[in-house]
Structure formats: C-alpha cells, structure tokens
Amino acid sequence: MQISILGCGWLGFPLAKKLVEDGYSVKGSTTTASKMQELSSEGITPYKLELYDNGVQGDMSSFLSNSDVLIIDIPPGLRRNPEADFTGKITNIISFIEKSGIQKLIFVSSTSVFEDQESFPEYTEESKPNGTSAAAKQLIACENLLIDNPNFDVTIVRFGGLISKDRHPVTILSNKSGLKNADAPANLIQREDCIQLLSKIIKNDEFGTVFNAAHPEHPKKSEYYAKEAKSRNIKAPEYDQNRPSKGKIISSNNLAEIGFEFKYQI
C-alpha cells in the first residue's frame, strides 16, 4: 500500500517514519527544500509542495499518483494569520485528488471546531461543530468540503492540543500573568498517541468516520500547568482567578469503539 502525507512537519514526519517502519510505501511533502534529503534518508519519497489560496506550486499530480491513502496534515496557520485562506488551499487540491483516483482520505483537524463556553459543554463525535471564530469556521468548512465530496471516503481526526516531551505549552506560558480560563478543562494529546491512532485508522481501514482525539483526563488548566511548570523547574503561569472561565470537554467515544487506548499521559 502506498500513502501520501501532505505535510511532513512536527506530526507528519514522525508519522511517515512510523508508516515506513510498518512496511508502507510513503510519499511526503515539505515546503522546505533543505528537508528533502532528511525525508529521503528515512525512506520517504520527498516532494516540495507549496499550497496557496489560488494554486499549488510543485508536482501535486506526481505526489498523489498511485497512492491508496492521502493524509492531509498541513497547519492552517490561522493563529498567526487569521486572514489566511486555508479553505481556499484545501479547495484547490480537491481536483488533484479527484484526478488521482485516491478515495481514502484522512484530514487532520482540531477540537477548536467546538466553541468554548462557561458551562464547559461536553462534545462528542455526534456533536455538530459550532465554533464561531474565523479559524474554526474555516476548519469546519474544510471538513465539510471533504466529507460532502462523493468521490472521497474521508475520516476526520480532530486532535486536542498536541504535546510531546520536546514541545509543551507550559514553556511558552511560563512567566505569563493574567491568563484567562483558569478553571477550563485541558484537552490535550501526546504526539505518540496521535501517531498510533493514525496508523490504526489505516491498518484497520477505519474510513468514513470522525474521531475526536483528546486524552480522557481533563484537569483544570491552572492546576495542570502549575504542575507541569514545577516538574520542569520553571515559573508557573499565573491565571486570573476572578475572571469567569470558558472551556469545553472533548470526549473521544469513537476511539473506544475501535479499541484504541491512550498509552501516554498528558
């Protein structure tokens, strides 16, 4: 089986290496010419591809050719640039996917498609995305573009906040004060669990469904980050306890149904 991974970044690259280890033939894309050799050295066929809201730079047709599965794992970049047209980028690659004949798709999305509220609502895979931010609306539009296309058998994977041993939000939050949402539940997932889940979806042919993917433990953000800061011997972020918190609880019911178990604590 051949797999194309659009976006071999912080998650996509180790995923590609795992799939190569599992015996799959893997093509991987990067926007950086200097990373081509790094991909190649890991047994990944590298492609330099750049997506724009009005077109694609690079040989997208060759990247998709003869693949059985396409994983779309490109960062929307909407936090840094809320005006970016991520929906336009996804729209522009749909015709390439249709022409390639690939039917099985995995779209890496985010739990940010669900709105934070003071009541801390619980969202399952049955919940309709209701995010109102510009970024959430674009992600929701992209999910629907792919789900509604009759040519595709799409699985949407909505990850919570991604963490790993070498990347954790507490290192950015340390020394900050006046942070809001002290009592909001954390919705996080370790990168290694993300990789295991995506591998399982492919291996078990779990297409045509939706997975929320966040660790089942949801500690209060202020307490969680204080603990994480202490374990790293850095200053804990300071939260404004007087402001009402908005948040949500992400439930990953469909993961249990396919026998997926979280192996890593948050």
Image (cartoon, grey):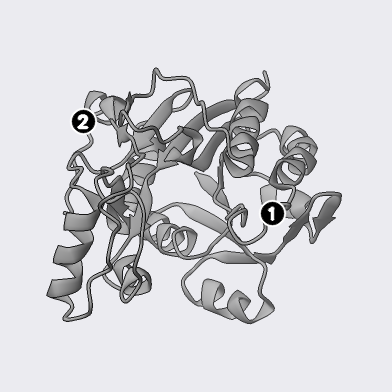
Q: Amino acid at mark 2?
A: Gly
Q: In this picture, is 225 found above or below 121?
A: below
Specify the label residue 259 is tagged with. Answer: 2
Front-most of residues 9 and 189: 189
Where 5 sits versus 158, above or below? below
Q: Is residue 33 visible?
A: yes
Say which residue appears at 43% left-offset and 39% top-offset. 111
Residue 175 position within the rendered picture, expressed as x and y whole percent measured from the top left: 32, 76
Per the model, the C-alpha gap separating discs 1 and 2 is: 32 Å
Q: Residues within 10 Å of mark 2 (few under 14, many from 20)?
A: few
From the top left corner, tell me how far across and down residue 169 is, in percent: 34, 65
Q: Relative to 217, is 200 on the left or the right? A: right
Residue 118 is labelled as none
Query: Which residue is tagged 1?
Result: 63
Indicate the secondary structure of the residue bearing disc 1.
helix
The image quadrant that residue 132 belongs to is top right
State the image coordinates of residue 38 (x, y, percent, origin top left).
Answer: 53, 78
53 lies above or below 237 = above
Helix, strand or loop for disc 2 = loop
Mark 1 is on which residue type? Phe
